[in-house]
Amino acid sequence: MEIKNPRRILAIGAPDSGILPLLKELTGSAPEPSSETTAGLTHEWQLETKYYTATLPIWLDELPNVAEWRAEFTKPEAREVVNVLGAWIYCFKKPVEAKDVATIKETMQAVADAIERACGYGGDMICLAVAMPQSTTPYLEKSSEEWEELAMEYGFEYVDSEAKGKNEFGEALGVQRVREALEAAEWESSADLDFGEEDEGFESSFEAEEAEMNRELFGIKGALAGFDDDANDDEAASGNREVEELEVMMRKMIAIKEMGEGMQSEERKRFASKAVTDLLKDV
């Protein structure tokens, strides 16, 4: 069975958390970043099991500040984005200090809050907390049992990406476990749509604006990365505001796009045209 309009995967993590290496090992490839951030990147995974085939869209987001990310994803307008997700993959480097564990807890709580706000307690999403290799040694030692209990408190399954083989119960470990968990997820979307040629007006209008926003966002973030310690504080603050505004606009763009998926072709085209026009009034 082919799933034509599957739910999405959202892969998140702090900067340099190892999302791209994980995706490459999991899917066989990974998107190429056009700047120093992975925020806004997208990817596709051709998943095939004996029960179904699906091309799963994967969205990437970066969390330099967990509190700010939580504030955005618990807003009412983020509900449409969260509702189309079938799985969350949270990547984090194995912690070096206790404060790193606190950040990991905060991030998992932020995801749990976003899901609860959008779906209530009945969210049927897969949530994986994937520990990636840590180059700094020695790092904080925690047993797998401790990690599993910690992740479970927030509705996550803990996976050590470096683990190989199977455990004493015959269950896969490491990235193979990530694959198995995702294969078992519910990917059927409530909106069973197949975008064809007649829908090009809707797709192209949103894709063009999304691409432009991505370029602007990456450009601004790249410029900010180039500021040195003596840079003008007002310029840096202005750039940060622009980044925040564009990130909010991109999330709204995704939400509006998903809202249009439940409409008939002509209605969807009219909706797309008006929605893009209204959205760009805020730019």
Image (cartoon, rainbow, N blue to C red):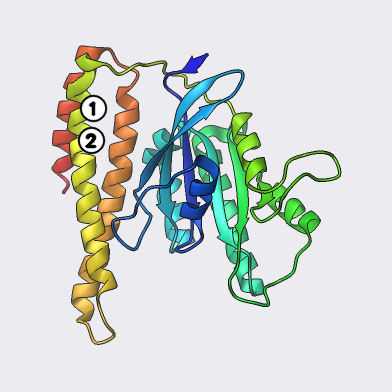
Residue 98 appears in which quarter of the rendering?
Answer: bottom right
Q: Secondary structure at mark 2?
A: helix
Please give the name of the residue rendered at 46% of the width and 53% of the height, measured from the top-left corner.
20
Relative to 265, residue 276 above or below: below
Relative to 58, residue 247 above or below: below
Under mark 2, the amino acid is Glu
Q: Which residue is mark 2?
A: 207
Number of callouts in the render? Answer: 2
Crowd around label 1: few <14 · some 14–19 · many ≥20 (10 Å): some
Are circles 2 and 1 on residues that touch, CB within 8 Å? yes
Considering depth in this image, is 104 or 275 the residue closer to the camera?
Answer: 104
How far across and down, in percent of the image, does residue 245 sit?
Answer: 26, 54
How far across and down, in percent of the image, does residue 190 sit?
Answer: 47, 19
Q: Which residue is mark 1?
A: 203
165 left or right of 192 in image: right
Q: CA distance from mark 2 to mark 1?
A: 6 Å
| Residue 212 seen from this side | yes
| Residue 267 seen from this side | no
Residue 123 appears in which quarter of the rendering?
Answer: top right
Crowd around label 2: few <14 · some 14–19 · many ≥20 (10 Å): some
Considering depth in this image, is 167 or 82 the residue closer to the camera?
Answer: 167
